[in-house]
Every structure is written in structure tokens, then in C-alpha cells.
Image: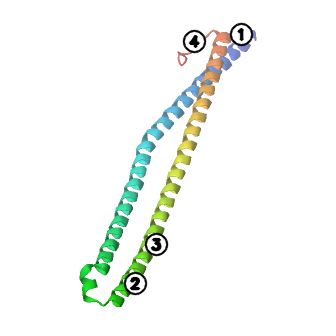
Amino acid sequence: MAAGLSAGRMLVRRHAAALAAARRHEADAEIDRLTQLYTVCTPVWIRQLETVRGEGDTEVAQLARVFGDIACKLDKAIGPSRLAHSSGADAHDEILAALARNGRELETLVAALRLLQTSKQRIVDEIGAAAARLKDNASDIRQIALHIRTLCRIEVREAQDNDRVSCPAEP
């Protein structure tokens, strides 16, 4: 009977050592999976940031062209040839009308620039917050994995000490 109990205890200890080794293997696999995930996600984020930056640059260039068009229209409105062919009052009214039109166009352009800047800042803030969350999650997962590894090693050592059986999974 005592031999049966001893054999049963030995089987339980071996089983505990095998479970501890399996938990450690699962923790290592989870760390590897997260490392691969971050390896895949990082280039995607970089491409997204470059896309946002490129779109912003394109919009700024387009707005600069609009400014150039406004300047050309203004030059046409107040150019010397128009002043020479018009009476003083007509030229003055044309200049004021052109300035009013250009002022409205400029207000529209400034509003578009403000909207673009707000949108860009919002995207940058969202990406920064998500990156911070990912970093925190990665740190938490590493800590959990380290705790699991430590617990697994303790269980394996206890099983080995109680049973004096070597476990090939433990280095």
C-alpha cells in the first residue's frame, strides 16, 4: 500500500512539473506572439503617419496655389492697365469689389487651414494615445509572463525537490 501511495505521489509531482513546464512554454509563446505582432504593426503605423503627413503637405501645397491665384486676381484687379482705361471712381469700385471677393476667398482658405490643422492634431493625438496604450499593455504582458515563468520554475523545482526527478523542460 505504501508503495502505491509513493508511486501516486511521484506521478502527481511529475504531472505538476509537466504542467509548470507547459505554463512556462505558453508564457514564452505569448511573448513571442506579441513580439511578432509589434513587429508587424510598427511598419503599418509608420506608413499611416507618413500618409497623414503627405496628405497634410498636399493640402498645404493646394492652399498655397489658391493663395497664388488670389494674388494673381488681385494684380489683375488693380493692375496699371485697368486703372488707365477706367475712370477713377470705376477703378476704385473695382478694386474694392476685388478686395472683398479676395477677402471672402481668403477667409474660406484660412478656415480650411484651421480645419486641416485641427484634424491633423486630432489624428496625432489619437495615434499617440494608442501607442501609449500598446506600450503599457506590452509592459503588463511582459510582467505577467515573467511572473508565470517564475511560478513555473518554482513549481518545477518543488516537484524535483520532492520527487528528485529531473525534468528535461527545465534548463
Q: Which residue is mark 4?
A: 166
Distance CA(mark 1)–CA(mark 4): 20 Å
From the viewer's side, name the closer residue of 94 and 69: 94
Using the image, determine if residue 150 lies above or below residue 118: above
Q: Which residue is mark 2?
A: 97
Residue 122: x, y in percent? Answer: 53, 56
Judged from the image, the secondary structure of the residue bearing numbered disc 2 is helix
Q: Nearer the viewer, mark 2 or mark 1?
A: 2
Distance CA(mark 1)–CA(mark 3): 94 Å
Q: Mark 1: which amino acid?
A: Ala
Q: Which residue is mark 1?
A: 3
Residue 78: x, y in percent? Answer: 31, 79
Which callout, 3 or 4, points at the residue further toward the start of the chain? 3
State the residue at coordinates (56%, 42%).
132
Q: Quadrant of residue 149?
A: top right
Q: Nearer the viewer, mark 1 or mark 4?
A: 4
Q: Which residue is mark 3?
A: 107
